[in-house]
Image: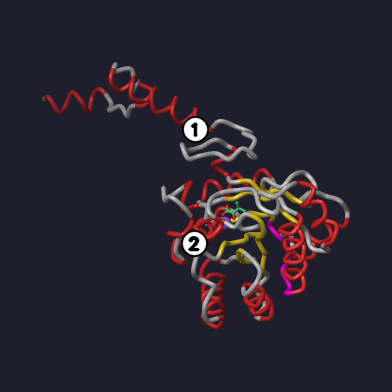
Amino acid sequence: MNTTTDFIKMKANGEKIVMVTAYDYPGAKYAEQAGVDMILVGDSLGMVVLGYESTVQVTVDDMIHHAKAVRRGAKDTFMVVDMPFGSYHGDPNEALKTAVRMVQESGADALKVEGAGEVLYVIKKLVQAGIPVVAHLGLTPQSIGVLGGYKVQGKTAEQAKNLVEDALRCQEAGAMAVVLECIPHQLTEIVSKKLVIPTIGIGAGPEADGQVLVFHDFLRYGSHHIPKFVKAFADVGEQVQKGMEGYIKAVKDGSFPALEHCFTMKEEELFSIYG
Ligand code: KIV
Ligand code: NA
């Protein structure tokens, strides 16, 4: 399995880091078999798997439940788990307790938290306790109410400067990587050049040291809104829909099950039933 220093080496060598989200056992297995560098059990699970409007309804127990399944499916892949909304603000000692529980119960290799500011102290505290932490800047979906919608961040010079400073502070606090979501690609380049730790972009351009996409978005599985920055690499949803319709039709018209799907009794046994 990769370690936090392997990811820093990959950045130094110019090797792109590939991260995908996973939320369950089969998804994790596919990701590991395909050879991704790291898996994120994202709180995006609230939208793409649980059918919530946003990530703010997702609980610590939801994250642990799904992360355990992912761990079983991808034992040898570095697994990052999102700390959900409300679980790492307030009392930092509570945040640490929650983080320890998440790591111990799910088998996470690292946890991810959104934002800088007061969160920098949480990053430091977790890292000091021995928990690798991934930071997340730019569009931070847990603050969607404050940001006022899913919009590109860091477009003005002032916002961009703040983001660069926040990224440096996350690195200083001990973060192992920084996810950059929905920011101009030129800003991604600036941040990536300033940091020693890798940047993992989503909607942030090719200049990031790695990329992350949401499983259900890039494989097109589900009917949720898919952001502009996503490229579809498969159409799983179409296959599922076709399969469903085919099954219904076959049962209705009697073509399924066929003899090859049946268990058959020997003739003599059958004969003895009737006497
Ligand atoms: O929850 C998630 O899937 C994420 C990624 C979009 C980075 O945080
Ligand atoms: Na997330």
| Numbered tag placed on residue 237 in the rendering | 1
Depth check, front residue: 179 or 107: 179
- Secondary structure beneath dot 2 equals helix
Q: Residues within 10 Å of mark 2 (few under 14, many from 20)?
A: many
**Residue 36 location in percent, x, y?**
69, 48
Q: Would residue 274 appear left or right of 239 to someone viewing this image?
A: left
Direction right: furthest residue = 13
174 in magenta: yes
Q: Is residue 173 visible?
A: yes
Depth check, front residue: 49 or 161: 161
219 in magenta: no
Earlier-in-chain disc, 2 versus 1: 2
Residue 257, above or below 17: above
- Gap between marks 2 and 1 measured at Cα: 24 Å
Disc 1 residue type (three-letter): Gly
**Residue 114 location in percent, x, y?**
61, 63
Q: Give the range drawn in magenta.
A: 173-179
Question: Which residue sits at x=87%, y=57%?
Answer: 12
- Secondary structure beneath dot 1 equals helix
Q: How crowded is mark 1: few (under 14 residues within 10 Å), some or many (20 or more)?
A: some
Residue 59, above or below 223: below
Disc 2 residue type (three-letter): Met
Q: Is residue 41 visible?
A: no
Direction left: furthest residue = 275
> Image quadrant of residue 95?
bottom right
The residue labelled by disc 2 is 63
Asked which colour scheme the image uses, the reply is: secondary structure
Q: Would residue 170 appear left or right of 71 to someone viewing this image?
A: right
- Quadrant of the frame with the C terminus: top left
